[in-house]
Image (cartoon, helix red, strand yellow):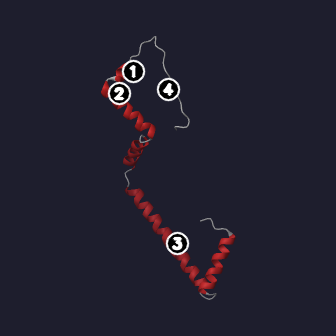
Amino acid sequence: MNIGWTEFLVIAMIGLIVFGPERLPEMSAQFAKFIKTMRTKASEATAELTGSVDTKAVTDLAKDLRGLTPRGLTTNAVSSVAGLTGLAGQAKSSPAGSAKVNPVFDPDAT
């Protein structure tokens, strides 16, 4: 939390008005205890989840998901269609004398 001095002063003034000067220290202590308890529970939950997760499975899933970009999906679709129609072999076995055509790079498409 990035709370500046002005925000802290406004919160303190609202707390002083709502709770009064005699209950404000007690309420602050209870709030601090609540925050400490929540941080402890969050740390315990994180440790439990980290310990129960199979890291190899997560790594494999992350590798699979990296291919789900628009470019990766398009490449897979084009290669599967080319393989079904028999164009894949023709593209690989181009005559040596023919000029290679470079695809046009469109910087706005990426």
| Image side of residue 56 versus residue 2, left or right | left
Residue shown at 69% from the left, 71% from the top: 6
Q: Which residue carries the number 3 mark?
A: 36
Q: Disc 3 and disc 2: Cα gap in Å?
A: 60 Å
Residue shown at 31% from the left, 26% from the top: 85
- Give whichever of discs 3 and 1 has the lower sequence position: 3
- Give whichever of discs 3 and 2 has the lower sequence position: 3
Q: Disc 3 and disc 4: Cα gap in Å?
A: 58 Å
On screen, residue 79 above or below 58 = above
Going by the numbered disc 1, the residue's amino acid type is Ala
Q: Quadrant of residue 65?
A: top left
Q: Position of residue 77 (x, y in %)?
A: 37, 34
Q: Residue furthest bottom?
A: 22
Q: Disc 3 and disc 1: Cα gap in Å?
A: 64 Å
Q: Which mark is residue 103?
A: 4
Q: Position of residue 59 (x, y in %)?
A: 41, 46
Going by the numbered disc 4, the residue's amino acid type is Pro
Of 71 and 22, the residue lying toward us: 71
How busy is the neighbourhood of tag 2: few (under 14 within 10 Å), some, or many (20 plus)? some
Determine contact: label 3, label 4, CB under 8 Å. Answer: no
Of 90 and 23, the residue lying toward us: 90
Going by the numbered disc 2, the residue's amino acid type is Ala
Q: Disc 2 and disc 4: Cα gap in Å?
A: 17 Å
- Give whichever of discs 2 and 1 has the lower sequence position: 2
Q: Which residue carries the number 2 mark?
A: 82
